[in-house]
Amino acid sequence: MSAPQFTGVLAAAVTPFTADAVAVDVDGIRRQVEHIVGNGIHGLVPGGSTGEFTALSAAERKVANRAYIEAVAGRVPVIAGTGALSTAETIALTTDAADAGADAAMIVPPFYDSLSFPEILAHYRAVTEAVDLPIMYYNIPSATGIELSPEEFAELGRQTGVTCFKDTGGDFPKLTRIHFDHGEDITALNGWDTLTFAVFALGTRAGVWGAASVIPALCAELYDALVLTADLERGRELWAKVNPICVFLESHNYAGAIKAGARLVGVDAGPTRPPILPLAEESVDELRGLLRGAGVEVVA
């Protein structure tokens, strides 16, 4: 199994739905891909929390992942979200993503019962043995109740096909320690919007970022400034525009806020699925103002 070193901004992508929310909108997925990739983003991560994966059937998850992979057509890596509540379903979803041509799978640990570390190792080892695909561990303790230590992250990387992890835990000191002390075993990627500046300045080479589905050009420009050219002054100028948007996104239901933003910039992805409610109109107005303040063209 090869271990890809992802670089750049990897957009956490929505799952577009038809207007009545009863089906995945494949044409909408194509629009999302052109908006994101066409504005300089370096990879896509469909099927995660931003993609409302818990509201999709297994069949719909396969359809959405396959549609994203097909629409990208090899232009950038696609890391398909395939985590599920059982090892068997995780393997089935990951196998389908691999067959469709995914470059890797992002797998959240089963999140109803908090697993012990030996159970986590067994789960990811079973997926590794069943599917020849690199794995991104989705670290989101608020949903899973699982807090791994830096040493456990390293052990996970050594014993399974987990090559990197998306950190949506918000613990910058822990991520920093893993980056410096355990980078040979596992690669730390940021997944917490308001830490993006800090983590790129730290020296990480990639991050998974939902805002990149709304403001891809600004996100790509920030990456160029902080990571590629080490232009800290330019990075600060950009972050002054982007950070208020990130604060807003983290202050609301994330999938709902990203879908509202997508509609505002002209790539409507349809409604959220219940029980997630659409963003209140006053909140949409606030987001519209933040986007305009960052120099983003708003069409809705």
Image: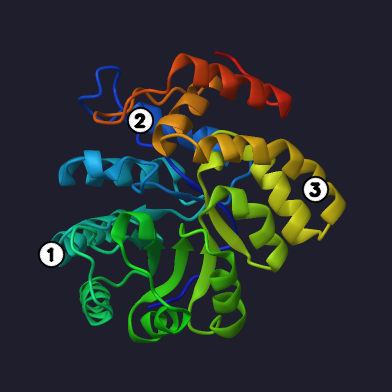
Task: Compare residues 282 and 101 and report the one nearer the observer.
Answer: 282
Relative to residue 168, is residue 118 depicted above or below?
below
Query: Residue drawn at (35%, 77%), measured in percent from left and top?
Result: 161
Q: Along the horizontal axis of the image, is 107 left or right of 289? A: left
Q: Along the horizontal axis of the image, is 112 left or right of 227? A: left
Query: Residue drawn at (37%, 23%), measured in percent from left and top?
Result: 278
Asked whether residue 88 is in view, the answer is yes
Asked whether residue 39 is in view, the answer is no
Q: Amino acid at mark 3?
A: Arg
Task: Find disc 3 in the rendering and name its residue.
Answer: 236
User: Which label number is shown at residue 16?
Assistant: 2
Task: Find disc 1 in the rendering and name its residue.
Answer: 88
Comes first in the chain, label 3 or label 1:
1
Q: Amino acid at mark 1?
A: Ala
x then y, percent, for residue 241: 73, 36
Relative to residue 285, is residue 80 depicted above or below?
below
Q: Amino acid at mark 2?
A: Pro
Task: Look at discs 3 and 1 and give the one toward the viewer.
Answer: 3
Image quarter of the C terminus: top right
Q: CA distance from mark 2 to mark 3?
A: 33 Å
